[in-house]
Image (spheres, rainbow, N blue to C red):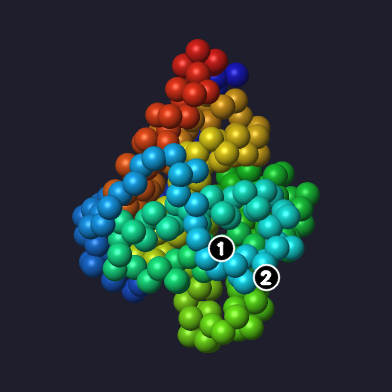
Amino acid sequence: MTNKTLPAWEQADPSVHADDPRAVAFRSAYPVRPVPAVGPVVTDTICATPSLGFEKLWKAIEPETRTRANDIHLPVVAAYATRLCDAYPEADRELVLVAVILHDTGWAHVDENRIISEGFSGNWRKAAIRFEHEAEGCVVARRVLPDLGYDAEFVEKVCEIIDGHDTRQVAYSIEDALVRDSDRLWRFDRAGIMASSSWFGMPVSDYVDRLSREILPELITDAAHQMAQRDLGRATALLRTEAIR
Ligand SMILES: [Fe+2]
Ligand SMILES: [Fe+2]
C-alpha cells in the first residue's frame, strides 16, 4: 500500500482554543513562527545527548513507564526537551522537563485495548482515549509531585501542560510549546519511527512521508524544525525508504 491510497490524517484545527487568553498571550509574545531560537540548536542524533537528573521522579513513575513503550518514549522526549530548553533559555526548564517526564503516564491508567484501536486509527487526534490519557496523567502528577517537594502552584502548571498536550492544537506558553514540540520530535528519531509506524499500522515509507508532510509543519519552534529535518534525513537514508516503498 502506498500513501497515495491512504487518506490524509485529519488536520489539526488551530482555531479550537485559539481565543483562549493564554493562547492569545503566547501568540502576541511569540508572533514569529516557527519561533526563532536564541540559544544553541543541536541537530546531532538524539542518542548523543541523553537527558540528565530527575532520578526520583523517574523512579516514582516506573509503573507508568511499562505501558505503550513509555520507557522509551518518555526518556527520548526528555532528551529532545533538554535540547529545546537550551535553544529557548527563557523557558522554565524544570517545568518543561517535569511536564515531559509525566506527560504520557496516563496511558498506564486507561483501557489498554483501546490505546491502539482508538488512539492510533481513524480520527485519532479526537479519540476519547486521548482525552482520558491526558486527564489520567494529571492524576499521576498530582499524586507523585507533592512528595517530591513541588508546591501546589507548580503542580498545577504541570497539569495545565499535560491536559491538552495531544488534543489541544495551540500552545499556551513557551513551556507548553517546548513540551509539544519535543513530544512530536521523538517521532522523527528511528526509535519513534519504528514504534509509531507500527502503532499506526503503516509502512515506514508512508509514515516518514506523513512526518514530513503533516507533522513537521505543526512544530512550533524553529529549533524543533531544524532537529526534525535533520533526523528525518538521517532516518530515511538509513532505512532506505526511497528504495523500500
Ligand atoms: Fe500523549
Ligand atoms: Fe507523548
For the residues labelled 1 and 2, the Cα–Cα distance comes to 11 Å
* Quadrant location, the C terminus: top right
In the rendered image, the vertical position of residue 198 relative to residue 131, given as above or below: above
Q: Residue 88 lies in what quarter of the image?
A: bottom left
Q: Is residue 113 left or right of residue 213?
A: right
What is the x, y in percent for residue 155?
Answer: 53, 79
Cβ of mark 1 under 8 Å from ligand 2: the answer is: no
Residue 60's disc number: 2
Pick whichever, 59 or 219, lies toward us.
Answer: 59
- Is residue 131 at all visible to an observer of this figure? no
- Is residue 115 at all visible to an observer of this figure? yes
> Element under label 2?
helix
Q: How many marks?
A: 2
First along the sequence among labels 1 and 2: 2
In the rendered image, the vertical position of residue 150 relative to residue 164, given as above or below: below
- The residue tagged 1 is 101
Residue drawn 34% across the image and 68% down it: 91
Q: Is residue 69 left or right of residue 171?
A: right
> Element under label 1?
helix
Q: Is residue 34 left or right of residue 199?
A: left
**Local crowd at mark 2 within 10 Å, few (<14), some, or many (≥20)?**
some
At label 2, which amino acid type do we have? Ala
What is the x, y in percent for residue 153?
Answer: 48, 85
Residue drawn 65% across the image and 76% down it: 144
What is the x, y in percent for residue 10?
Answer: 50, 42
At label 1, which amino acid type do we have? Ile
